[in-house]
Image (cartoon, grey):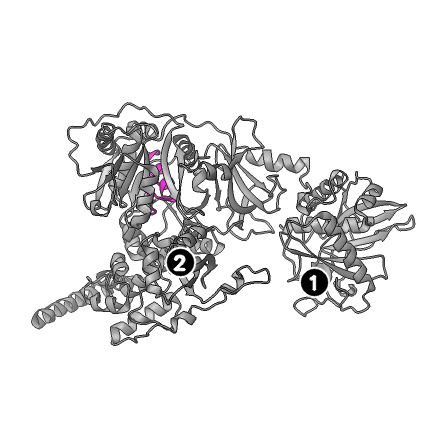
Amino acid sequence: MTQDASPNSYSPENSQSVASVMGNARTPPNGTGDWGTDRVQLPFARKTNGKGPLASAGVNIPIEADGTGLVSKFGADLDSMFLALWATLLWRFSDQSEVVVACANDPGKGTVSAAISFSPELSFAEVVLRVQQARSRADRANSSVNGNTQYLPGFVTETASSNTKHPAPNPFQIGLRVQSRGGSPALELLYDPACFSRDTVERMARSYATMLNALPTSSPDCTADALPMLSAQDYGQVVIDFNQSAVPYPDKCVHELFEYQVRQTPQNTALRFHDQTFTYDELNARVNQLAHHLRKRGIGPNVPVALFVERSAEMIIGLLAILKAGGCYVPLVHDEPQWRLSYLLADTQPPVLLTTRELLPRVPAYSGEVVLFESPLQEEFSSNPENKTKPGDLVCIIYTSGSTGVPKGVAARHSNLGNYIQFIRERLGHPQAWHFATVSTISAILGNTSVFGSLMSGGCLHVIDYETALAPNLFADYVAKHPIDLMKIAPSQLNTLLDGAEGGPILPGKYVVIGGEKFTWELMEKIRKNGSCKVMNHYGPTETMGCCTFVADGYDFGDWKPGSVPLGRPMSNQQLYILDRYLRPVPVGVPGELCMSGAGLTQGYFNQPQQTAEKFVPNPFSTQPGARLYRTGDQARFLPDGNIEFLGRIDHQVKIRGFRVEPGEVEAILKRHPDIRQSVVVPEDSAEGEKLLAAYVVPSRNLELSELHSFLRQRLPEYMVPSRILMLQSFPLNRNGKIDLPVLSTLKAEEKAIEREIVAPRNTTEEQLAAVWREVLKQERISVHDNFFELGGHSLLATQVISRIRSIFHVQLPIMDLLLSPTIAEVAEKISQYPKAGMEDEETERLLRELEGMSDEEAERLLPAEVEDDEAAGQNAKRQS
């Protein structure tokens, strides 16, 4: 039962002194008399300026527990018990390690603060003891300072009498009031409606009541976070109501869905790569011939086939042919290190590897049969092969970074992708003949889900090659020539394209789908400034084949805005739960681990039963036998409407440019170097706020950075090579003898840079290139012989270098050339050899700007002058030659 208290007002200027929990004067941390920076950050709190009187409303908290029994059980007075429980609730809602509560007693006794530190292993009995000690010290403290305590959550104790017509005013934005009424306590959450909605406060009141009423049956030694806090009402909301996602979807294999689409739209253009195009009929016939060829080589259900191709038409033909033959495709990235490719082949043991003649020399040692796309297939049937695959069979094995030091393969089923295909078609409104762009590798989940939404809806899939997908001017040129309706892309890649496009078209006409990394409001604003397409945030680890989406357009955040664009709500036939470390659901607003179940849940890790059992656990919320729950390791919380906000990682896993990276895998590779005694790899933030990997190593001899970079590049993909490597004589240790990670992050890269020789630019070209290097890498001391990638550069930063070189020198530097010749000296030597780029486009744009707004007569006068200038320039060039 809840009810509003009588409105009251309170002026913060009348607040009394604040005393320290340690018995000394505790001042506001910013020295201004304002506790705003030290307050508990509660979810859904509305921003206010902290000035003027506070209004007051209240929500009653029912008490079922026997107060006398609690006093005896925990050896504390009831007020201390209530305060300890209030501090525990604030800790669990805010996820802050220290909670400061302002305690106001009966009038005349002043206001004191109690600071309680929390940790996961802290027992509730210890919380009660700390509260008692804090109150005792504060009562003995004579010194105090003035401060505006309204930002602190409050704890108010009062003695009610029959003569009291109105309760005392509320001095806090939110606080717990304990009234003693003839020996029986009455609890009420007081709040200012300008700061918190009533729904939020009622939810907190229910959680407090649930924790309080669980105390009689809880052990005094139970940890504070073990107390249940989810009421029956809130359980129904977060477990049942938010997961109403059941809809029918086809019980078909992925290639069967493609064959259905071929029958529906046989003459639609299905695939484009550069100027090469296929209708659905043509693509299906080509795929069928290769599928028959593969089936003759023993490919059938659940048999892996390695697909070793670049982004091309062959990439799509190959994966569809593997599925039609009955197998599951294992995408291999052609430019990954030989060691990693060899491991993937050894782990999956594919009897056939499908590749091109051009890539054949890069195939590592392999005992199976190699099939080339160039093989003559004219004798093979072009009709659909007989389907021998079931929806529960494997569709692909996609490898992600593994914390044990080796990659792990996620084994997905046809039914997982089939559910996703049905969902995305319905979410997009059953698009007809849209143009989809795939700009990501199919070795990651982002690239796979980009493909099937197009081919199973009658759309045209544009396969964008690696160079074009990373170069803003090339991508803008492509989109100008071939307009795109929908593109799915990682935030870091989209940021690079938008920043370097110089006004060229980048965004699709209808939808941009963001996935693979945290989606910031800054990027959302940039999208809004550059286009009018709808924006969809798409979240889902590889293990779930996508699990939730959020369409930002038209969404009303009200008075409270989450820290990043929400992940969204469950996709069709998926269930999402936010759980504490005991795998219990938490209320709306409380941080926890995001866990997922449903039709998207993959089979697990290929040949890794132990890791599968650790991450895929029994689902306690399902009545289906054998139902499982995937623990993502992502920290999140429910928003009031059921959307989910991403808060970070529970472990050290990090996303680098859309790729999932386990620092432990990089550490394991470093430790294989014979001259490395110790190594630590941690995620850090760049100056621009992007995630990067930093490696700290203790070598056993004087080791060159170039040698270590070369060692890592032979064993790791480019995105997993740390951007920052520091060599130390020893690691700093904390008081417990463990490596002090916060101290490591403060060490400067320049400490090692002093040891290398700095060769200054020797001509104008090198000076201009050095300025570009310094600007992009944010470093001042750069030698013309320094390797761009050893200084922390990566593929997306390389595109910024290429864009600036194009602007300064008017040449198009291929990204592969920068990868092969990554020093200023090498680029300067070759720069005159590259073809001129953009001159004609710039001249055309200049002429159009001049023509705009002119009368017909002015334009006619200008054009002959331009022609004469061009002719004169041409004659001069001939004479000079």
The kind of secondary structure element at disc 2 is loop
Residue 84: mark in rendering:
none
The answer to whether residue 347 is above or below residue 41 is above
Q: Is the N terminus in the top left, top right, bottom left or bottom right quadrant? A: top right
Q: Quadrant of residue 735?
A: bottom right
Q: Which residue is mark 2?
A: 722
Q: Quadrant of residue 621?
A: top right
Q: Is residue 800 visible?
A: no
Residue 51: mark in rendering:
1
102 to the left or right of 404: right
The residue type indicated by label 1 comes to Lys
| CA separation in Å, label 1 and label 2 | 48 Å
Which residues are the magenta region?
Answer: 434-457
Please report the residue visible at 36 percent of the width from the left and 69 percent of the height from the top.
774
Q: Is residue 142 visible?
A: yes
347 to the left or right of 17: left
Do tag 1 and tag 2 residues touch (Cβ < 8 Å)? no
- As rendered, which of 226 and 609 lies closer to the eye? 609
Foreground disc of the pair 1, 2: 2
The answer to whether residue 48 is above or below residue 490 is below
Provide residue 617's location: percent of width, then percent of height: 53, 35
Please report the residue visible at 50 percent of the width from the left and 39 percent of the height from the top.
615
The kind of secondary structure element at disc 1 is loop
Instruction: Say few, some or many: other residues with alpha carbon within 10 Å of mark 2 (under 14 / 14 to 19 / 20 or more).
Output: many
Instruction: Say few, some or many: other residues with alpha carbon within 10 Å of mark 1 (under 14 / 14 to 19 / 20 or more).
Output: few
Q: Is the C terminus in the top left, top right, bottom left or bottom right quadrant? A: bottom left
88 to the left or right of 594: right
Provide residue 737's location: percent of width, then percent of height: 56, 60
